[in-house]
Amino acid sequence: MKNKPVIDLHTHTIASGHAFGTIEENALAAKEKRLSGLGISDHAPGVDPHTNPLSFAKLCNVPRQLYGINIYYGVENNVTNEGTMTLDENLLSALDYCIVGIHGTCYEPKDAVTNTDNLLKCMAHPKTFFVSHPDDGYFPLDYERLVLGAKEYGVALEVNNSHIRNPWRMGTLENIDIYLKFCMQYRVPIFIGSDAHEPCRVGDFEAAITLLDTFGFEEDLIINNDEEKFRQFIGFKD
Ligand SMILES: [Zn+2]
Ligand SMILES: [Zn+2]
């Protein structure tokens, strides 16, 4: 890969309840990995009972630069079985971006049609720019519809480094292969996320890079290998 990711937009801090780094520790780790930007995307309520929704209200108090790293305010929101998301709308509106993903702690698996319907409803939300780890076969998806929906709503799908590094979920590698093919066919962007829950994992993209290189994925379609491209994608204004 010629242009590796320069922003890690999928990272967790102690505010998620089950992650271990502070924002400062994650920013220092991003600096050590020579990234230019870091997105804080803690879990919305529904994954861990210890997530405090107020932490999202306070996120805008975090400086826009820490240790020379640009900081973005995000969330990893949850899909519900009603096709809604679990973070309060007012809290969501103040953030730079929303990642949405299916998490088994607050979602009962259904058939591929229903799961895809529910995810697409969340992708239609104007704050949603990213889908996390749509690769777990325990929550089957119709990948062609998912990718076409991503194109329609201006959403990028994740290639999740953590899921590839530890591929114990059902069909992860096969499923990634399927949606990457559709992304290339329909020219739909992806992003590489570390999904770091520890500072040492911030900016860890190696397993995903190896997979994408082996696949022969087009680098132009990767959103987070250029900070300006990322900012335009989420409509970020200083
Ligand atoms: Zn997740
Ligand atoms: Zn995550």
Image (cartoon, rainbow, N blue to C red):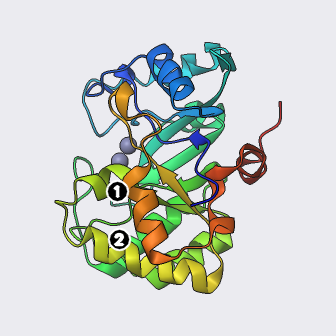
Note whether residue 210 is visible. Answer: yes
Q: Is residue 80 left or right of residue 65?
A: left
Marks 1/2 in contact by CB < 8 Å: the verdict is: yes
Q: Is residue 59 above or below residue 169?
A: above
Task: Kindly identify which residue carries mark 1.
Answer: 102
Q: Position of residue 8 (x, y in %)?
A: 53, 40
> Residue, x 66% and y 33% (percent of image)?
36
User: How crowded is the residue under tag 2: few (<14 C-alpha within 10 Å), some, or many (20+)?
Assistant: many
> Residue, x 64% and y 48% (percent of image)?
127
Quarter where residue 189 is shown: bottom right
Q: Which mark is residue 41?
A: none
Q: Identify the secondary structure beneath mark 1.
A: loop
Q: Earlier in the sequence, mark 1 or mark 2?
A: 1
> Residue, x 55% and y 55% (percent of image)?
130
Query: Does the beta carbon at disc 2 come under 8 Å from ligand 1?
Result: no
Residue type, numbered disc 2: Asn
Q: Is residue 115 above or below residue 105?
A: below
Q: Position of residue 227 (x, y in %)?
A: 72, 43
How many marks the image carries: the answer is 2
Q: Is residue 203 left or right of residue 114?
A: right
Given residues 100 and 63, the one toward you in this image is 63
Residue type, numbered disc 1: Ile
Q: Position of residue 44 (x, y in %)?
A: 41, 36
Q: What is the C-alpha distance between the residues marked 1 and 2?
A: 9 Å
Q: Position of residue 185 (x, y in %)?
A: 59, 86
Task: Kindly identify which residue carries mark 2.
Answer: 115
Q: Is residue 95 left or right of residue 132?
A: right
